[in-house]
Image (spheres, grey):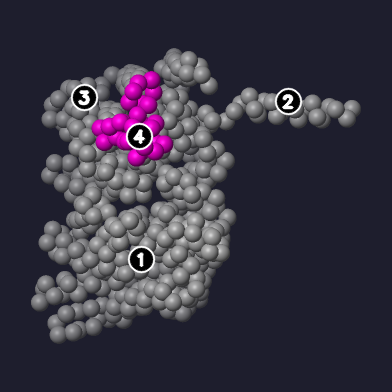
């Protein structure tokens, strides 16, 4: 029973991780930019949700669409005005730039909200399935996360914009020749990345405390999930997230929770060297 | 700037830093120690990040390991300078072994891998409490002889490390190795094709980029007398060092020196005046740097600017 409980915990955690990483993975895959802002964007979404709930009593589920839209606009403008100017430059440049933007956002969040952890307590209790306890807030978070990730998958598969994004990811020069405005697709993709980060922030605000101290941790998780699953695809992030969730859950039980993160990072380093395309990645797509 | 001008500039700068105890307050001396320390780190990063163009963010791992190996050796009774040497050799060997593995990666994957290394080493050090003291950190014996004498000793030590790093840079810059690394930076496959042993060169550059970090880390630990995992393996340091180098001009002899000096002085001013916003200002410096100074301070053509200013003043006078 203990093993099964750990597995279920891992899967629930994995659903959350998938949602956390899918936007990051998309931006990395399509723009070839490692978005160091991702962790801060998640926490930013969390803060907006927290204050909407705390000051105006808006339920996080109602806040979700608004936060998502706001973050999309923020991401779109940020990409169009700044990151597009350096998008074709070497890794060092783009990573340093997004890190600089991250420092700015982080600093303002710390000054205005302080680093004190805040938490939305919904008190939903726990579900008991034949001896396996699942906290309802986490389950809800996982379902929302999976729902959003599934929606993103559909958007990428079915919509014109989604197909255009995939085309740009495959070959941006050819896509430009086909009449796709690559700059705009980049901005939309970055917007979607920010949107998913904001939505993740809303979901995480219901499960974890909201504090700027966690931005680095979230970013680290996004790295690991991307490397495990493979870049730029929704299924990759899903597989990577669930695998990481299960591994962390079991590693936490075996070696103590403080080592769960170490195991995740070690796994990432090994996979980077052994299989840089990730578990479900396609060769030549790295 | 000509090479000899760069060397001359460095010599003047070194004398200026070294002479601070003679003419300045303890605060300035401390600042000089910090500048020398960061200059050594930035010069080190320049080998892999500047010459070879690999986006390495593992400086903090090397620095932190240097801190811990130095501190542990000193606590085991090894004399201070010998402990620094041990730390240097250990970190160099670590980087060579690690480089053989992760230098197979390129671009983003290398960058992520090098960040991962920092995290793994930090987590291992902080969870291996029986040896490293875990999150509580380690205390080191402080040198006796009063703060002024101690500051002078560490100023001298840091300046010597900086000088060693600079001389190594000069040597790499003029040698076959530097040429090979520049080839790798421009096009690794082509470099490989024309007979540059890319794997070997990259590992050498990566090891060089770690060596002095180990020395600096160990002497930093002796200087402050206390280390802990969060301070030693700070990811912010891993980012700051490349930014300093980019600010000055990557892949040049003097760029790292100028960049570090400019950055550290700016940061000091911001720390003093805008404590709450110092990270945001660092971020703004980065953004400005990326957009307006893509080649760093060294790449600005001062003659060009002077020419433009001269033209402007002529044009203003013309109507009269």
What is the x, y in percent for residue A36?
41, 53
- State the SS at label 2: helix
Q: CA distance from mark 3 to mark 2?
A: 53 Å
* Residue beneath disc 1: A233
- Magenta region, residue range: B173-200
| Nearer the camera: disc 3 or disc 1 | 1
Residue holding disc 2: B310
| Residue B309 percent coordinates (x, y) | 71, 28
CA gap, disc 4 to disc 1? Answer: 33 Å
Image height of B168 relative to B47, above or below: above
Asked if the magenta segment contains residue B193, the reply would be: yes
Q: Position of residue A223 (x, y in %)?
A: 32, 56
| Residue B72 position by quadrant | top left
**Per the image, is A113 magenta?**
no
Which chain is disc 4 placed on?
A: B
On the image, numbered disc 4 is attached to which residue?
Answer: B191
- Say if mark 3 contacts mark 4, CB within 8 Å: no
Question: Disc 3 marks which residue?
Answer: B85
Circle 1: element type: loop
In the picture, measured across the screen, residue A285 lies left or right of residue B130, that is right
């Amino acid at each position: 029973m203990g093993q099964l409980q750990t597995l279920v915990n891992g899967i629930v955690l994995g659903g959350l991780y998938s949602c956390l990483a899918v936007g990051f993975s998309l931006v990395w895959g399509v723009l070839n930019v490692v978005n160091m802002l991702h962790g801060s964007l998640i926490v930013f979404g969390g803060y907006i949700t927290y204050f909407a709930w705390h000051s105006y009593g808006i339920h996080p589920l109602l806040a979700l669409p608004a936060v998502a839209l706001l973050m999309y606009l923020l991401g779109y403008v940020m990409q169009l005005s700044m990151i597009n100017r350096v998008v074709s430059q070497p890794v060092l440049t783009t990573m340093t730039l997004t890190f600089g933007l991250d420092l700015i956002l982080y600093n303002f969040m710390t000054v205005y909200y302080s680093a004190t952890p805040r938490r939305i307590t919904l008190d939903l209790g726990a579900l008991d399935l034949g001896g396996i306890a699942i906290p309802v807030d986490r389950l809800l978070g996982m379902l929302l996360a999976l729902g959003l990730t599934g929606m993103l998958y559909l958007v990428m598969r079915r919509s014109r914009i989604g197909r255009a994004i995939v085309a740009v990811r495959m070959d941006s020069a050819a896509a430009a020749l086909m009449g796709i405005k690559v700059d705009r697709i980049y901005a939309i993709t970055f917007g979607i990345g920010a949107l998913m980060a904001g939505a993740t922030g809303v979901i995480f605000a219901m499960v974890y405390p909201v504090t700027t101290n966690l931005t680095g941790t979230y970013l680290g998780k996004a790295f690991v999930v991307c490397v495990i699953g493979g870049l730029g695809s929704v299924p990759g992030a899903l597989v990577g997230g669930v695998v990481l969730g299960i591994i962390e859950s079991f590693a936490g039980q075996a070696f103590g929770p403080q080592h769960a993160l170490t195991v995740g990072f070690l796994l990432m380093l090994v996979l980077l060297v052994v299989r840089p395309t990730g578990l479900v990645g396609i060769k030549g797509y790295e | 700037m000509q090479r000899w001008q760069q060397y001359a500039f460095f010599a003047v700068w070194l004398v200026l830093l070294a002479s601070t105890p003679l003419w300045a307050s303890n605060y300035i001396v401390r600042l000089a120690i910090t500048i020398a320390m960061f200059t050594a780190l930035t010069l080190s990063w320049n080998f892999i990040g500047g010459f070879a163009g690999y986006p390495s963010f593992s400086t903090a791992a090397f620095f932190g390991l240097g801190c811990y190996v130095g501190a542990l050796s000193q606590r085991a009774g090894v004399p201070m300078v010998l402990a620094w040497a041990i730390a240097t050799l250990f970190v160099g060997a670590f980087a060579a072994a690690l480089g053989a593995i992760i230098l197979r990666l390129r671009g983003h994957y290398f960058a992520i891998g090098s960040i991962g290394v920092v995290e793994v080493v930090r987590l291992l050090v902080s969870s291996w409490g029986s040896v490293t003291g875990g999150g509580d950190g380690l205390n080191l014996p402080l040198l006796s002889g009063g703060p002024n004498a101690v500051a002078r000793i560490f100023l001298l030590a840091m300046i010597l490390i900086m000088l060693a790093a600079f001389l190594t840079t000069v040597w790499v810059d003029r040698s076959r190795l530097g040429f090979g690394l520049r080839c790798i930076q421009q096009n690794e496959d082509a470099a490989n094709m024309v007979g540059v042993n890319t794997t070997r060169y990259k590992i050498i550059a990566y090891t060089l980029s770690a060596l002095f970090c180990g020395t600096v880390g160990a002497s930093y630990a002796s200087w402050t007398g206390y280390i802990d995992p969060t301070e030693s393996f700070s990811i912010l340091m891993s980012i700051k060092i490349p930014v300093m180098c980019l600010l000055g001009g990557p892949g040049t002899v003097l760029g790292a020196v100028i960049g570090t000096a400019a950055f550290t002085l700016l940061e000091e001013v911001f720390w003093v005046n805008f404590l709450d916003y110092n990270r945001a200002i660092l971020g703004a410096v980065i953004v400005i740097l990326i957009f307006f100074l893509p080649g760093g301070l060294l790449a600005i053509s001062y003659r060009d600017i002077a020419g433009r200013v001269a033209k402007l003043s002529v044009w203003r006078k013309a109507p009269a």
